[in-house]
Image (cartoon, coloured by chain):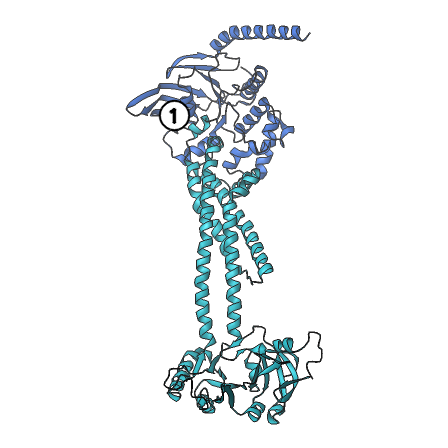
Chain colours: A blue, B cyan
Amino acid sequence: MPDKEVHQSGDIVRLIDIRKTYITGDLQVPVLKGIHATVKRGEFVGFIGTSGSGKSTLLNILGMLDVPTAGQYFLEETEVSQLTDVEQATIRNRKIGFIFQSFNLFPHLSVEENIEVPMIYGRIAGRIRRKRALDLAQRVGLGHRLGHRPTQLSGGECQRIAIARALSNNPAFILADEPTGNLDEKTSDEIMKLFHELNREQGVTIVMVTHNPALGPHYDKIIRLRDGRIDETLLEWEVKKQEHAVFKEIEEQRDKAEVEINEVTQ
Amino acid sequence: MMLMRDLFGLSLHNLLLHKVRSILTSLGVIFGVGSVIAMLAISEGAKRSALAQIEAMGIDKIILFSKRPPVDGKSESSDNAGVMERYGLSAKDVSNIMKMDNIERITTVFDARKKVLKGLQRTDLKLIGCDYQFLQDSSAKIEKGRWFSPADYQNNALVCVIGKNVKRRLFAIGDTDVVGGSIRIEDMVFRIVGIVDNVYGTQYPEIGGQNDMIFIPITTARALYKDYTFVREGYAYKITRIEYDLFLVKIADTSYIDNTSKRIARYLEKAHTDTKDWGMVVPLELLRQRERTQNIFTIVMGSIAGISLVVGGIGIMNIMLASVFERRKEIGTRRALGAQKADILLQFLIETVFLTSLGGIIGITLGVGIGSAITYYSKMPTIYSAWSIILSLAISSITGVIFGTYPAYKAAQQNPITVLRAE
């Protein structure tokens, strides 16, 4: 990939034997049974699994909303799973850009204010915040929407704002939880394309957790979870091979659907 | 921790977002503060007017008065008519009290006990002989005309100064030449030289309100009426002799007024051994007593009103707890975006304090409104002291802190994982 910036300064994320066991009464429910994984700087990594595979738990641990029962989580060479609450909040703020399935924008704040929220918690001065919010909104193609409320925007636009918000503190990586789950197919593609651009052109590291087996052309690496373990790790060329087949199928279906719609409207 | 200014902006934003709910939520505090303010204003007003009345009697004075000794069978019975009854303060008392320390002067007052008639109707207006200093020592003001001159005293002039109620009762409303006119009492005619007004309507023991008096120089009164009166009882006349009815004893240094009053009381007890035919009022003492009772009244009323503040606070706590539940997703998102527990705690706490302070401000307005309405309709005076307003504001903010801490703590303790999943 000649157009891709690669910073070789070690792994962004390194998970070593992450285990998580929930205890309900006398019952111990192991959810993660030893996860080893790394995310390199500039990579686009997908964690894929069906519900019950432990991917939500892994997402929470990656996002430092939850701590593992055992194992180590290195974020930019720092072991973060045993930090205090305040330190974790600070790292969450500076290093992780969250993107949610249902966008989780603040409906009563304007687009600009929404983008500013992480910067406020990062204690960045108002003047700099506003400038950066404008930059980011332009980067996701919504520079003209700064004064709007999220309720005045479409789902795709909302997710773009959420992406701008996630990028506002220049995080080490973007952690996206099913980011296209609430969007229609066309918008999903656009959003995925935006992620792809951010990754390829601006070198943003992206970790995406999804149950969607349609792989897309974007991932550098796909880690498939099954029953709390890593089932298989597909590298880029393998992803390409698989997705080729899947995408062909999807596109065929879409064309067929469009033809049908055209027939109906005519 | 988040920047304070951003937190304030955020809280204000959230409250403005739900304007009606914010007002409804702070209703308890609004009424609580409103009633505290109104209550304090009313009791402060009552206190001031009561104190002003007492003060008008003169807090640098001791008032001594003659009173009819109690009937106990030994000294007097109902059928001793014709016997001269003698009681009260005397000239000897004046000179003896004057000899004591700390006495500046004694203004003497004498009730002539003459019937004042309006047409053929008897009135309760009094004909009073008084010293020259009486005007100065009685907190009355000349409304029209003049007070007596020293010459009036020397010449036993037949002049009088009337209280403002006397004018109202004896003369027609539009009568413009009251001063310069004359008044006839029994067989004597007095020229009216002035009208006095005592705005506090000071009442003296035994002889009554100042505004109902017709004053004449005490020398004139002595020359005309001596110091005894005949009162017809059945077929006989009863003679009552009273030298003075009232002394206004002016004290040089009020910080020793307690001692001075005790000394005078001791003297009078000794001098009037057989009967208790005198009384004493120390306005300063009355003032202190009144102040004490009024303060207790204020505290009790304030506490009752304060209870509604507590109820209001609990109401706010309830709503804020519900709001924490309602906003779980917001809290979770904020935590994921890097908010610390302290940020969340402060956000909710500031919101609550904002609410209660807002309620406090509206409540103060409401309280002032209620107080003004009461004054307007019932003529009850109300006084808004700066400290009652500052206190109410402080209490409403503190209510916010007290009742906002628990919901804010709850909000901060929300687990971001579970609240993010909640829809």
- Residue A72 or residue B352, whichever sits in front: B352
Determine which quarter of the picture holds residue B268: bottom left
Residue most extreme to the front: B235
Evaluate whether residue B342 shows in this view: no
Q: Looking at the picture, does residue A237 appear above or below residue B190?
A: above
Q: Looking at the picture, does residue B228 appear above or below residue A113?
A: below
Evaluate whether residue B286 shows in this view: yes
Residue most extreme to the left: A26
Q: Looking at the picture, does residue B220 appear above or below residue B334?
A: below
Q: Position of residue A19 (x, y in %)?
A: 34, 22
Q: Position of residue A240 (x, y in %)?
A: 50, 9
Determine which quarter of the picture holds residue B151: bottom right
Residue of label 1: A73
Identified by mark 1, the residue type is: Tyr
Q: Position of residue A143 (x, y in %)?
A: 63, 28
Q: Position of residue B99 (x, y in %)?
A: 44, 90
Q: Residue placed at 41% from the left, 31% from the top?
A: B415
- Residue B362 or residue A239, whichever sits in front: B362
- Residue A146 or residue A221, whichever sits in front: A146
Residue A14 shown left or right of residue B223 in the figure: left
